[in-house]
Image (cartoon, rainbow, N blue to C red):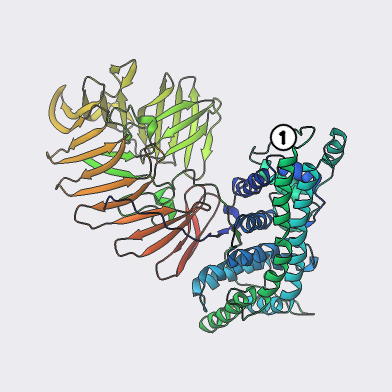
Amino acid sequence: MTDNTPATQRPRQAAVVPLDQIGVEDVSRGAAVFDAWLRDISGGYVNLERLKDVAEVLPVIGNIIALVDAVGDVVNLASSDKPDPLDWVSLGINLIGVIPAPPTMAAARKSLRPMLVLARQEGKQMLGDSLIEIIVGHLNATLLGEIDAFLIDAKGQLEVILKECADVGEKLINNTADAIDAVITGKLDSATDLETASRKATAAKEALRSDPSLVFENAFGALSDAYSAMGKGAANLIMRKSVSEPLQQKVLARTQAFRSLAPQLRSQLMSLTSAANPNSIEGMRLILESSSVLWHRRNPKVQSTTVKDNKTTQATRQAAKGETEAITQQEPARQAANDSKNGTCTSSCNRINFALGSESLDHTDFSLPGPFPVTWTRTYNSRLDALDDGNLGARWLTEFTTCIDVVGKGLVLHDSDGRSHDFPLPEKGKPHYDAVEYLTLVRTGGQQLVLLRGLDRQETYARHGDRYYLTHIQLRSGAGAMLHYEHRHNGRPVLSDINTYQDDDPTKVHLQLGTLLDEHGRLQGLWQVVDGTPLRQLCAYHYDDAGDLIAAQDENGAAWHYQYQHHLVTRYTDRTGRGLNLEWDGIGPHAKAIHEWADDGSFDVRLDWDERIRLTYVTDAHGQETWHYYDIQGYTYRIRHPDGHSEWLFRDARKNVIRHVHP
């Protein structure tokens, strides 16, 4: 089971995403692909910044997402010895979203694009109800139109639309090739010419908007602005006085080959109007139309919102807004979702996170009842390298050992669930509120922070060096816990006592717990203390020379055992001796767990991450594959199940689920 299996070469995927989940960083990533290709084909002389100054102006409508995907398709076609026919289909779909004419259909074309991507992804003659429901919600959010009427209108316009797509696509290719040639052959290489060219006006200041009412006067300017939006854009390349003759010939040969795509593009796109072509856009439109008819038969009470000629129509259907957009390049997820808000599983059965590939463990050693109940649950997170020198072993913590690190000019909270959250360092008396996590951070003094968890719990942290340590927990009920740090190791405080109390009175001690340290400052165990005397040992811990926790004994004497490589857990056994094993794709804290299985072969799961979009393929022990799509914060918005049906989750700005479409 530990043998590495070669990665499956998967076809390129597109993500159909709730529009508000597409960020600047995603659009910028797509533009960066085009920039890298320009540098490669031109021998390093042309990038996006230079192209926008040199290339002939190419107007497009204000859909930067579709534009970025279209140039990405061009790069794929130009880089392939034998282009995939589906890449031409993808280019046609994306150009539909950017062509400027006819202008009265701009919004409709923008709406059609993600619908076609969904139909192409399904690859079947009939779409499921959940997908039609998503499409209906998308149209209501964009056009307030009836799906059947929309698809019938699209039928009559498809040939005209694709002809315009071919015109724009040819110009995109030829203008790019001409600009590269002009730079390489020295036709535009003087400082005066470049200064004049750089003053060309573009309407790309709104480049990161997806708004069909806008027009970008120059597509290349919009792409350049998208690339530089995340600080990626480079200054215009410094031209040498001349390009060597061998390099000139090499680059000119490349651009000539690139130009040969233009006539192919026209013939390929026009073939997409035929339903006889199995991958045609007309074929996809027919699938959408027939699926919609059947959906309406099964849902006869759904009210039409079509606007009738010369009549006033009031649409009273209360459907949650569900505008979507398609995109083929996304930045990887930056964090894991809050399990309690995700609305569906965020990880495998044994806690490999789908977004990050991180492994988490939660093991409880003892529980003591009372006004402030103490449940000592240890949490391991493979990404928690800030606690590699932690006093519970590398990358372990509890709700009583959470801390806040000072990092640069900001703060990082290492929370009890193993996730870390960035905060600015708040000014004194000015709170910072995290609406997603329901956390409020207040600076009450030069060396003290207060963290509010909703309305029920307040935590106080005191600074020592570059870390704030938890010193006090107060509950809304009046119960609380005082934490003391009488131990020291290498100049750092280490938890020594936990005293719980009630009635808002810390002198009314209910429970007293004490810690025992080893020679490396790590917790050897906790004891329940009564009248100053250790009464009962609650847990015991053992560590290896690398500082990893290798054995943990609970209050009943049962033990967990752990094995690691580079602080990444590779095997652990529960208190009955049953073992689980993990395989990783690297050795650093951001390594992903790609395979997990129990000793008896159960719970076998393999995970594979898409290279271009935020999508994880999860394969179970039976070979059934589930696709998990998620936003940059790790929150799921779509799950495609092994039977091909999908469920969707739409969220508000606080990541609360406001609409859940089941398969």
Give residue 656's position: percent from left, percent from top.
Answer: 49, 53
Q: Is residue 8 above or below residue 34?
A: below
Q: Residue furthest bottom?
A: 297
For the point 77% across and 42% down, the residue is: 184
User: In the image, is residue 515 above or below residue 568?
Assistant: above
Q: Position of residue 98 (x, y in %)?
A: 72, 60
Quarter of the view holding residue 80:
bottom right
Q: Which residue is mark 1?
A: 235
- Residue at 50% x, 71% y is 130
Instruction: Report x, y in % for residue 307.
Output: 72, 76
Nearer-the-camera pick, 474 or 308: 308
Q: Of 650 and 67, which appears nearest the observer?
A: 67
**How busy is the neighbourhood of tag 1: few (under 14 within 10 Å), some, or many (20 plus)?**
few
Which quadrant, please, contains the C terminus?
Answer: bottom left
Q: Residue 49: which quarter of the image?
A: top right
User: Compared with residue 432, is residue 161 higher up or lower down, i.e. above or below?
Assistant: below
Q: Is residue 163 visible?
A: yes
Asked which secondary structure carries label 1, the reply is loop
612 sits left or right of 230 in the view: left
How many numbered circles does the render carry? 1
